Amino acid sequence: MYSLNATILISTELATPQMSNNTLKKILHYINKHYNENLTLTSIAEHFGFSTSYITKLFRNFLGKGTVDYINDLRLTAACEYLISSNYSIGEISNKIGYTNQYYFNRLFKKKYGVTPKDFRKSKNL
């Protein structure tokens, strides 16, 4: 349940883009620091005391993408760095960036980059 104060704050922030932008910066900083943990839209909203719909609106209005898309992009970028610069297995990388299901990670990676993580690593290590 959200308190009356949180509801008032949300209403105020929706009216002032600068405050919304500052809120988004704080949320992005939090996500960038914790992307490898079990982050969900709900857990982020609870951490900051906002509704999930408010967080979703912030992301859509300022970034043009959803919260989950942002987290996945961040994780997949980190995966590329691990694939190029480490000898971790694909499963280890998947876990390090916050995915508990390697098959889901592989599917997202291939959808974004057009190749599997394994093929990506091979192409970068030639």
Image (spheres, grey):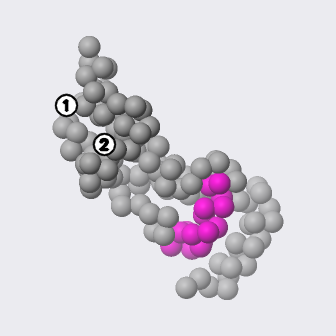
Instruction: Name the residue: 53% across, 56% down.
Output: 67
Q: Is residue 16 positioned above or below 32 on the image? A: below
Please tell me which residue lies in front, 115 or 101: 115
In front of the other: label 2 or label 1? 2
**Residue drawn at the location 57% of the way across and 54% of the way down:** 66
Where's the C terminus, which quadrant? top left
Q: Which quadrant holds residue 82?
A: top left
Q: Secondary structure at mark 2?
A: helix
Which of the two residues, 48 or 69, is positioned nearer the viewer here? 69
**Direction from residue 49 to residue 8 in the image, left or right:** right
Magenta highlight range: 45-60
The residue singled out by tag 1 in the image is 87
Asked if 111 appears above or below 46 in the picture, the reply is above
Residue identifier under label 2: 106
Q: Position of residue 64 (x, y in %)?
A: 65, 48
> Where 83 sits versus 16, above or below?
above
Rendering quarter of residue 91: top left
Between marks 2 and 1, how big is the CA–CA gap?
17 Å
> Which sits earlier in the primary sequence, circle 2 or circle 1?
1
Asked whether residue 52 is drawn in magenta, I would say yes
